[in-house]
Each structure stands twice: as C-alpha cells, then as structure tokens.
Amino acid sequence: MRAGVLPGLPDARERAMGEIAVSSRQLDHLLHVPAGTYGSPYQQAFAELAVSHRGRPAAEIVPLLRTAADAALLGFTGADLAEQAQAISAGARYELRVRVTGA
C-alpha cells in the first residue's frame, strides 16, 4: 500500500480524492503502524468499511468513519468524512493527499 492511499475496493473504476492538512504531531497518528498489523488503525477501519458497507448509504457510514478517525486522533472534518463515505458507498477507490503543516 502506498503512503497516503486509503484502500478501497481494487476493482472499482472510479476514484475519489481528498486532501487534508495535518500537523507533524497528527502525522504520527496517521502513519502509526503497530507491530504485526497492516496499515494504520484508520486505514484498517476504512478498508473494512469499504468491503462491508459498499452500496450502503453514506449517511450510515459517516459515524463509523468518525469513530475510527477520533480513535486515531485524526481531525477529519465532516465534509472529509462525507466524501470518504460516498467513495465507500459507491465502491470507488479513495486517495487521500496529506499536506503536513509545521505546527
């Protein structure tokens, strides 16, 4: 998996892309990979939802993404999560650009 890519379903033709700005302190939470796991906790949650919630309403997916983002201490906005939820619902691949700020 490439850094900055949240895996969706591999056969999806459409691709959504979002961009967030995170502080260097938040970047540690985004990229943290505990030993013996694949990707960060948020990436894992996103990948699981991409499989289990494809075709479900985005409004149903947003609270699940919010829980995962809050647990990972990521500051996604409601709009960020809605965009990600729509990609999951549609079965689209979702790429997230991460811009690191100095604070």
Image (tube, rainbow, N blue to C red):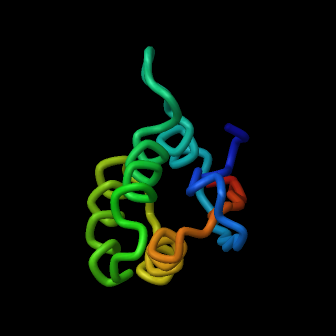
* Percent position of residue 7, x then y: 58, 51
Closest to the observer: 64 or 15? 15
Instruction: Work out which quarter of the rendered image holds the C terminus and state it.
Output: bottom right
For the residue pair 99 and 24, the one nearer the viewer reads as 99
Report the residue at 68% width, 61% height from top: 95
Q: Where residue 88 sits: x, y (%)?
A: 48, 68
Q: Is residue 66 above or below residue 45?
A: below
- Outermost residue on the front side: it is 11
- Please state if 17 lies on the left or on the right of 54 as rendered: right
Q: Is residue 40 above or below residue 95?
A: above
Q: Nearer the viewer, residue 9 or 41?
A: 9
* Residue at screen point 63% across, 64% down: 94
Quarter of the image where one finds residue 93: bottom right
Determine which quarter of the picture holds residue 8: bottom right
**Residue shown at 53%/38% (left/top)?**
28
Which residue is situated farthest in the top direction here?
Answer: 35
Please state the horizontal and vertical placement of residue 86, each as a whole percent of the image. 49, 79
Residue 44, horizontal then vertical, whole percent = 43, 42
Give the answer, above or below, for where 57 lies relative to 8.
below
Number of on-image labels: 0
Please, is residue 81 above or below residue 10 in the view?
below
Of the 4 image quadrants, the one containing the N terminus is top right
